[in-house]
Amino acid sequence: QVQLVQAGGGLVQAGGSLRLSCAASGSIFNINTMGWYRQVPGKQREEVAAITSGGRTNYADSVKGRFTISRDNAKNMVYLQMNSLKPEDTAVYYCNADTLPRDSGDYWIYWGQGTQVTVSS
């Protein structure tokens, strides 16, 4: 059993900052890419940022230069530092992890529970 538990989020004024964290736990053998997605009502979930186990990162154009993804491989954690937040960043944010459980020969995508980020203008 693998679980991803998120922390952080909340309400912030435009221009402010928030930090999200996500901890993977359970019977984990290895984690490849970890990432952050967001979703607003009526729209598809979109990828915000991703980071490989080697530290290579990728960002959506809309957040480049404002958001920073990082991870701690020893702790199986991923973080999203969000600066210069805009009202259009308002969404539910989800973390995910491409994970190889100890009792499986395949990688599976696991998701966090989601956390609301609201940016007021």
Image (cartoon, helix red, strand yellow):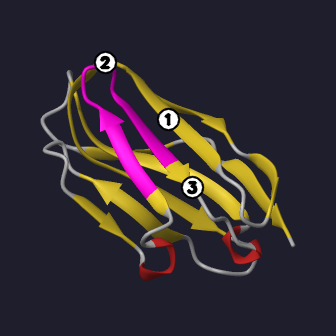
Mark 2 residue type: Ser
Residue 22 in picture, x, y percent from top left: 50, 35
Residue 86 in picture, x, y percent from top left: 70, 72
Question: Which residue is at 67% across, 65% downward?
Answer: 85
Q: Nearest to the eye among marks 2 and 1: give it.
A: 1
Position of 61 relative to 73 (above/below):
below
Within 10 Å of the Cα at label 1, are there few (<14), some (14-19), or many (20+) other Cα atoms? many
Question: Is residue 2 visible from the viewing direction of this image?
Answer: no
Q: Which mark is residue 27?
A: 2
Q: Nearest to the eye among marks 3 and 1: give it.
A: 3
Label 3–label 2 contact, CB within 8 A: no
- Alpha carbon distance from label 3 to label 1: 14 Å
Which quarter of the rendering shows the N terminus?
Answer: top left
Question: Which residue is at 73% across, 80% downward?
Answer: 42
Q: Is the magenta stretch mostly helix, strand or loop?
A: strand
The residue sitting at the right extreme is 121
Q: Looking at the image, is mark 2 or mark 1 earlier in the sequence?
A: 1
Q: Residue 82 carries which label?
A: 3
Which quarter of the rendering shows the C terminus?
Answer: bottom right
